[in-house]
Amino acid sequence: MNSGGGNSKTIEDLDNNMLAQILFRFPSGKFVVGCKLVSKRWCSLISDPKFASQFSNYKKEITTYSESSPIIDDGEPPWTFIANITYVIDRQQYCWGNVSINEAMFGTPQFSIGFLPYAFVIEATFKDLVLCSEKEISRIDQVYFITNPLTKQWVALPPCPVFSKSWVGLVCQEPCDYTQDYKFRVVVIDQCPPPVYDLMVYCSEIGEWKKFNLRVSIMPELAAQKHHFNDSEFEGVVCNGIIYLLQRLYFAAFNPFDVDETTSATTIEAKALPSFPYPINGYLRESSGQLFIIHNPNKDHYVCYQKHGRVINFPFIAWKLDPNQVPLIWKMTFDGSCTGNANKIESSCGKNLVYDMSVSTLGMHPKNDKLIYMHLHPEEQLVSCDTRTRLIKPLKSLQDYRLETFHRLELQWWPTPVPKAYLSE
């Protein structure tokens, strides 16, 4: 700039369009929000929902996706797993403490959700929003919270009548204008003997919980064997705003937004989807808007690892279903093993499959369906399996913890505001 003063210009001389173009080039919305303190003009510009939408659209247009990194992609917002973890007080006596941690499993990004006013348990996530429940509950009701851990915003929902739960989910409509005025559903399902389950749905438009029966269709060829599978594992996942449910007897889906203030029925019918020709009790996961089932070659629930010296081996099978394709067909995407160094892993799993020596599938990379993340038990090791290279990479050791539940958290270019919770007077 000219130091003479006559032609000197400052950033304040720029019009709003030019100033916005400069702010669009900041790494993420988190950095831009801090600029609200510069001046009233900057605060007004950045607070405009149109700015948030334009910022996100600009980032999406210039982003080039890279599969080179399993945790953070070049040009993409970071993501991580968050989990409920319990400290191990006395490992030798298998005495578990009551101290819980809620943290990012990969340490990226660094954040905490300890700002909530109550002891809580993480129940579900939807992109960068986290659904928690109050840890200490009364016999009458259960309180749920929705929070964004980066902005530290949170909102409490009206109390939910307490009943046992097998799966809890949060589903939001896209907040296109980046305000708090968007619809969402909190869904609580209790695993009862199929084909009918207890279902609670919170409707944001009316601020009320509604109770239903959720009915699913059992595969005809397995109906006679229903009593054998009543206690088998129950899986649920949200994909493209739809809730998908998997159990050995069925694969089904329902749209939680079909429930609204006009719904008077007492039973919700889940749509039957393509099933396997045999009972399967695998892990139902989502990546890139597609569904995956990951299971053991012996058609059992647990993927067992094998050890030869310092080398470990995970055999498993992966199937993919694209909900947008017609007809819906499961396609096998992987059938084989991933291999890697054992590091500190000492035990192994041979022909006799035991629960204490198994691998559970945490989840999948949100945009790279070739990367699957697994948890070794009892070694408490987190690893990634790349089905292209068939290599295993150690990620994190949890030697002093017990991993309980885990959820994928995907940061957005602009943080999602927590929705408004309708509270009736």
Image (cartoon, rainbow, N blue to C red):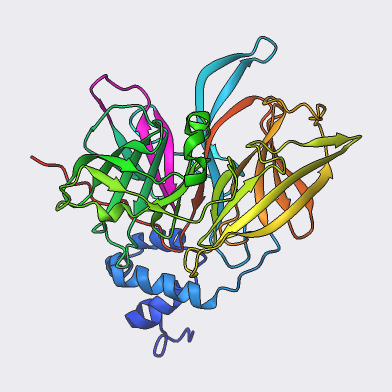
The x and y percentages for residue 249 are: 49, 41
User: Residue 361 appears in which quarter of the rendering?
Assistant: top right
* Residue 309 in the figure: left or right of residue 302: right
Identify the residue at horizontal 38%, vertical 25% (top origin): 135
User: Residue 42 appears in which quarter of the rendering?
Assistant: bottom left
Residue 124 against residue 354 in the figure, above or below = below
Res 152 seen here? no
Tally the marks: 0
Q: Which residues are magenta?
A: 120-142
Magenta-colored segment: predominant secondary structure: strand
Q: Which residue reaches farthest top?
A: 93
Identify the residue at horizontal 78%, vertical 49% (top origin): 338
The x and y percentages for residue 335 are: 74, 53
Q: Which residue reaches farthest left?
A: 425
The x and y percentages for residue 346 are: 82, 27
Inspect the magenta stretch and tell me whether residue 130 lies in it: yes
